[in-house]
């Protein structure tokens, strides 16, 4: 344990150069150098670390430091953020190469924290983080955590396109619409994400932009903040090229 603490100060200075990994609710396999000290930064405050006799580990706030030997081993981490608890597990494989700095991203944790029932005004940064999570969930065909389906179908005009709302989900701070766009007339029309931004719109995704042929359909997702107080500044609009 003493060896781990001796390296902790140096590692904290280098954590900015960490390799980012996105948590997928399964044990991560990490290749690390043999006989090294590995640092893993989490999006929450570490409460406990579980190891076997093959490694030593220590932690400081949201970062875990692990002294790795020469054989594969597993490590479990429990952490907490604003009353939400999460558990992570890793398989460490010592090799001749590998990384020593890692940073864990957890979109589900972010959404759980943002979706907690609090009597506070959600900041624009939090809304954008939540909007990105909602976008990814909808693109996977999933219902975002903390959201529910609403029976809402409508059509409206945007420039030379007709927008058909196919699906809508609603959360405490956001409403997201899955749409289909069709050009009007018999000649190709130009489509851009900016055409779909209106009051309170935070994020727009389109599967295709540019000139759209007559009869062609384009799928899209529009995410808006609920309530006039959440209106996004035009300079903060997010166009996501999620191909």
Image (cartoon, grey):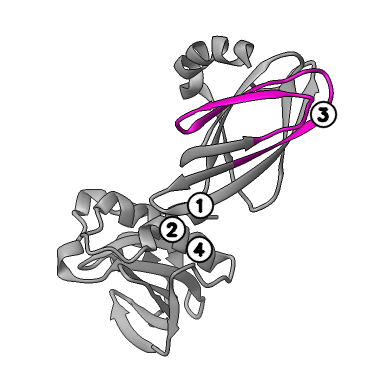
**Label 1 to label 2: alpha-carbon separation:** 13 Å
**N-term mark: 2 or 4:** 2
**Label 4 to label 3: alpha-carbon separation:** 42 Å
Count the numbered circles shown: 4
Closer to the camera: disc 2 or disc 4? 2
Residue denoted by label 3: 72
Residue denoted by label 4: 207
Which SS class for mark 1?
A: strand
Image spot of residue 241 (x, y percent):
46, 53
Residue ID at (43%, 73%): 147
**Label 1 to label 3: alpha-carbon separation:** 27 Å
Q: Is residue 223 above or below residue 6?
A: below
Residue 111: mark: 2
Around disc 1, counting alpha carbons within 10 Å, would you say few (fewer than 14), some (14 to 19), or many (20 or more)? some
Q: Are marks 2 and 4 in contact (CB under 8 Å)?
A: no
**N-term mark: 3 or 2:** 3
**Label 3 to label 2: alpha-carbon separation:** 33 Å
Closer to the camera: disc 4 or disc 1? 1
Residue 85: mark: 1
Which SS class for mark 3?
A: loop
Question: Left of 213 or right of it: where is 93?
Answer: right
**Label 2 to label 4: alpha-carbon separation:** 24 Å
Image spot of residue 64 (x, y percent):
56, 29
Q: Is residue 103 above or below residue 55?
A: below
**N-term mark: 1 or 3:** 3
Which region shows up in magenta? 50-77
Residue 210 seen:
no
Q: Are marks 4 and 3 in contact (CB under 8 Å)?
A: no
**N-term mark: 4 or 1:** 1
């Amino acid at each position: 344990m003493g060896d781990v603490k001796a390296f902790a100060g140096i590692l904290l200075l280098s954590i900015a150069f960490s390799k980012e990994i996105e948590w997928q609710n399964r044990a991560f396999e990490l290749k690390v150098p043999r006989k090294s000290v590995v640092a893993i930064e989490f999006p929450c405050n570490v409460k406990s670390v579980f190891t076997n006799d093959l490694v030593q580990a220590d932690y400081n706030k949201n970062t875990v430091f692990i002294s790795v030997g020469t054989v594969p081993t597993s490590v479990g981490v429990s952490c907490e953020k604003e009353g939400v608890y999460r558990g992570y597990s890793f398989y460490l494989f010592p090799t001749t190469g590998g990384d020593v700095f890692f940073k864990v991203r957890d979109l589900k944790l972010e959404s759980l924290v943002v979706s907690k029932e609090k009597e506070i005004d959600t900041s624009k940064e939090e809304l954008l983080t939540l909007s990105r999570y909602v976008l990814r969930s909808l693109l996977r065909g999933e219902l975002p955590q903390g959201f529910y389906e609403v029976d809402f179908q409508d059509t409206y005009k945007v420039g030379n396109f007709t927008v058909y709302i196919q699906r809508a989900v609603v959360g405490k701070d956001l409403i997201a619409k899955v749409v289909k766009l069709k050009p009007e007339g018999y000649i190709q029309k130009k489509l851009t994400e900016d055409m779909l931004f209106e009051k309170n719109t935070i994020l727009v995704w389109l599967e295709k932009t540019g000139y759209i042929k007559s009869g062609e359909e384009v799928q899209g997702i529009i995410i808006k903040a609920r309530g006039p107080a959440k209106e996004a500044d035009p300079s903060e609009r997010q166009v996501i090229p999620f191909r």
